[in-house]
Image (cartoon, rainbow, N blue to C red):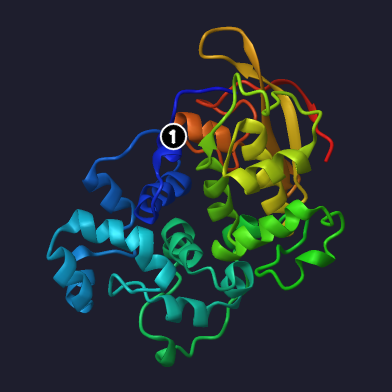
Amino acid sequence: MKTKTGLFGKLMNRMGAAILVTTAVFGTAQLKTEAARAADYAAVFNATWYADHYPDLKNAYGTNATKLLNHFLAYGMSEGRQASAEFNLDAYKSRYSDLRDAFGNNNTDYYIHYIRYGKKEGRDASGTAASVSAPAQQPSAPAAQQKATNGKQPIQNGDNWQSIPGTSDPSYAKAAEVLQSLGWSITNAFNWSAGLTYYGHGKADMPEEGSPGTHWFANFGFDNRKGNCFVMAATFYEFAKLCGYSPRQIFGYVPRRSGGMGPHSWVEIDVDGETYVYDPDYTYGTGKNGFKIKYGQSGTWHYTDYARMSE
């Protein structure tokens, strides 16, 4: 589906990941004020603390809170940097085996879990890994739900993806290579698909219906780093499958900006008996959260006349 160029299509460098993380995690429809954005990460980030404990950052950014937060979102979390006395990544990992099972070595997921769930659950993220002696706890419902799908634990690295049935098409090797660079994170993978350069209407080599199949669209996206909604959905479909999920690529229709209905594609995944929509093009075109939304959810597109595409 053709839409006006959105936020994610313009973020072409790594520092842009700061905004990607904010949007994917908190589902914001518009860019937030700096104060509101900082408040979202207050549980794990304090600008003064961050600058004072990392001379390289203080030399580069001084006490500029906005630049320090941007660095933390784009680099600091993935590097495992501590940005407040309240949250130490190594301590959080060491204390809770359910989180290690869920997130593996994807550092960013631990920070996000603590913000969204861990602090409310009373989990302790203070101290250092060496000082941690608390026993591992049983998985909390939010932690388990965040990664679970049909009772199956998604894989955390690329060691065994070739053993997953139905991944013999060459496009999956390309997907695995990209996933390796993304830390095998399903949220990072979604943002990658949503960040492809839009290439669609009027292009002779870019179909706007599902008959070429998922693998055709995925290969086009991995080879060219551009495509329409079918390509965005197909690349995410393959990412999700390699991460242990059971996705379905869907072909259907959504309202056009100019009126009427237009062809569109997205991905479905069942989690704990519920069907969720994962729509990278929706995120690309609107700047809103299209990761794990529900059909009919307020503010989302109206999906109609849809069916599963063939691979």
137, 65: nearer the viewer: 65
- Count neighbours of disc 1 (C-alpha within 10 A) and say few if under 14, some if 14 to 19, many if 20 or more: many
Q: Is residue 280 left or right of residue 211?
A: left
User: Which image quadrant: the N terminus?
Assistant: top right
Check the image and name the residue furthest to the left.
Answer: 62
x 58%, y 77%: residue: 137
| Position in image of residue 207 (x %, y %) | 71, 26
Task: Name the residue at 16% across, 63% down.
Answer: 61
293 lies above or below 297? below
Could you say which quadrant of the image residue 200 lies in?
A: top right
- In this orientation, which residue lies closer to the viewer: 100 or 236? 236
Q: Is residue 179 visible?
A: yes
Q: Residue at image x 21%, y 70%?
A: 57
For the C terminus, give its image quadrant.
Answer: top right
Residue drawn at x 23%, y 46% as measured from the top left: 34
Residue 82: x percent and y percent? 33, 74
Residue 245 at least partly seen: no
Q: x, y (%) of residue 23?
A: 42, 44
Q: Mark 1 points at which residue?
A: 287
Instruction: Work out whether 205 lies above or below 139.
Output: above
How many numbered tags mark residues here? Answer: 1
| Residue 65: image location, x then y, percent | 18, 58
Q: Is mark 1 on a helix, strand or loop?
A: loop
Q: In this view, does 71 lie to the left or right of 274?
A: left
The disc labelled 1 sits on which kind of residue? Answer: Gly
- Picture quadrant of residue 27: top left
